[in-house]
Amino acid sequence: MTAVDLRSKIREVPDWPTPGVGFKDISPLLADAEALEEAIRELAGWVKDQEPDLVLGAEARGFILGAAIAREVGCGFLPARRPGKLPPETVSVNYALEYGQNSLELNPDLISRGTRVVIHDDVLATGGTVGALGGLLEELGAEVVGAAFIIELTFLNGREKLGDFPVHALITY
C-alpha cells in the first residue's frame, strides 16, 4: 500500500462554528477507506509504544478512531461523554474551548488506580478538552501516558496545557 497524503483529506470550513474559526473537518479522511486505515494504523503504532491499558476517546470525534485504535493496540476503550449520556455514577470536568465552554463525564468505576491511559481526540487546539480530561484521570488515580490526535493546531499552543505526557499528531497546522 502506498502512503496516503492525510493532509489532503482535511477540509477547511471557514467561519464555522463561529466567525473567524477555520474548522478542520476530518469527514473526507473518514470517508476515504485508505486514508482511514492509514490514520488508524499510524495512530495505533504510536499509542502502542505508550503501553496503555485504555484509550479514552473524547466525545464526539474522539470516539470515531479511539475504539479502532484501542482494538489495534489490544487494550480497552472508554468514552468521555457529554453530561447525561452515561448511567450514574459519573464524574465530570468543565473546560474552555477556543469558541466556548463544555463538559465531559466518565464512569469512575472503570478507572482503577494506576490505569495507563492514552487520551484520543480528533484535534488538539487550545488543549482545553484533553488538559481537563488528563486532570480528571489523574484525580481518579490513572496515569496519563500520552495523547494522540489526527490534527494539531500549533498556533493555539495547546500542548502547553497538557503537562508532561507525550503528545502525537498526524498532521500539524
Image (cartoon, grey):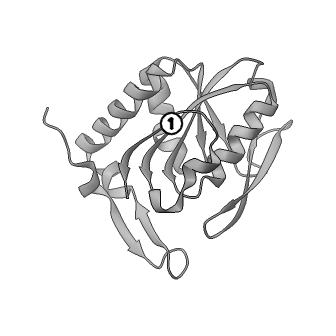
Determine whether the residue tagged by mark 1 lies in a helix, strand or loop: helix
Mark 1 surroundings: few (<14), some (14-19) or many (≥20) residues within 10 A: many
The spot of residue 7 in percent (x, y) is: 28, 54
Residue at the (39%, 55%) spot, across then down: 26
Is the C terminus in the top left, top right, bottom left or bottom right quadrant?
bottom left
User: How many numbered circles are shown?
Assistant: 1
Give above or below for 95 relative to 48.
below
Q: Is residue 4 left or right of residue 36?
A: left
Q: Which residue is mark 1?
A: 66
| Any part of residue 143 in sight | yes
| 83 and 47: which is toward the camera | 47
Is the N terminus in the top left, top right, bottom left or bottom right quadrant?
top left
> Hey, which quadrant is residue 99 in on the image?
bottom right
Give above or below for 28 relative to 115.
below
The spot of residue 148 in percent (x, y) is: 49, 38
Give above or below for 18 relative to 111.
below
The spot of residue 56 in percent (x, y) is: 61, 34
| Any part of residue 153 in sight | no
Residue placed farthest to the right in the image?
89
The spot of residue 20 in percent (x, y) is: 50, 80
| 15 and 37: which is toward the camera | 15
Q: Amino acid at mark 1?
A: Gly
